[in-house]
Image: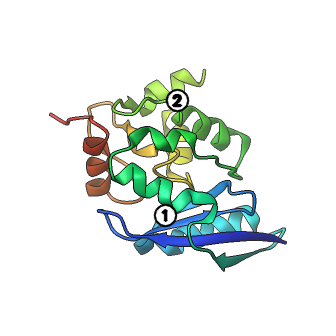
Amino acid sequence: MLTFLEDKIATPLGPLWVICDEQFNLRAVEWEEHSDRMEQLLVIHYGAQGFRRAASENPGGLSDKLRDYFDGNLSIIDTLPTATAGTPFQREVWKRLRDIPCGQVMHYGQLAEALGRAGAARAVGAANGANPVSIVVPCHRVIGRSGALTGYAGGVQRKEWLLRHEGYFLL
């Protein structure tokens, strides 16, 4: 059975759950109001092998590092380790998301092309939406082809705030 260490931090956008394994690899980062979604993803990915959640203050320093991100140290998220479950395709999308530089965006079609899967924008969008480690795996950096802020599980207002925080100024 896996043990996940969990903490909840205050952010300018509301309380944020930080969940990692005992090796301090992030398994989930989710807004408190979307805890049900996070719990569903944990059960989908780890329910078969079993897991338990244990409260932990600042596990592995991850909570402090996420606070640093919100305080303006934007590059800190590039250093945070993740260990996500998911399908091979989802993990491929999530890995590529981490390559989008802070302050820049891609649209879903560009991300599909970067993965060598031109025409798979919808599948990329679905994988993006199933990302369990938001902010650190920066799914908020993917926008619609027209520039519209579409498809962020935490809400479009949070997506816009995160993009502005990272220096991407919307027109």
Q: In which quarter of the image is residue 3?
A: bottom right
Going 45% across and 50% down the picture, which residue do you hit?
Answer: 135
SS label for mark 1? strand
Left or right, 156 with respect to 120, comes to left
Q: Residue 30 carries which label?
A: 1
Going 73% across and 41% down the picture, which residue do you hit?
Answer: 88
- Where residue 41 appears, as percent x and y from the top left, is 62, 64
Left or right, 151 with respect to 114, comes to left
Quick check: 110 above or below 58?
Answer: above
Mark 2 residue type? Asp
Q: Which mark is residue 99?
A: 2
Mark 1 residue type? Glu
Q: Name the image quarter holding the N terminus.
A: bottom right
Q: In this rendered view, identify the residue nearer to me: 157 or 144.
A: 157
- Where residue 153 appears, as percent x and y from the top left, is 42, 58
Category of crowding for the residue at label 1, using alpha-carbon neighbours closer than 10 angstroms: few (below 14), some (14–19), many (at least 20): many
Quick check: 22 above or below 142?
Answer: below
Left or right, 102 with respect to 161, comes to right
- Where residue 63 appears, as percent x and y from the top left, is 51, 62
Q: Can residue 137 be seen in this view?
A: yes
SS label for mark 2? loop
Q: Marks 2/1: CA distance?
A: 21 Å
- Where residue 17 appears, as percent x and y from the top left, is 50, 68
Going 69% across and 65% down the picture, which residue do you hit?
Answer: 44
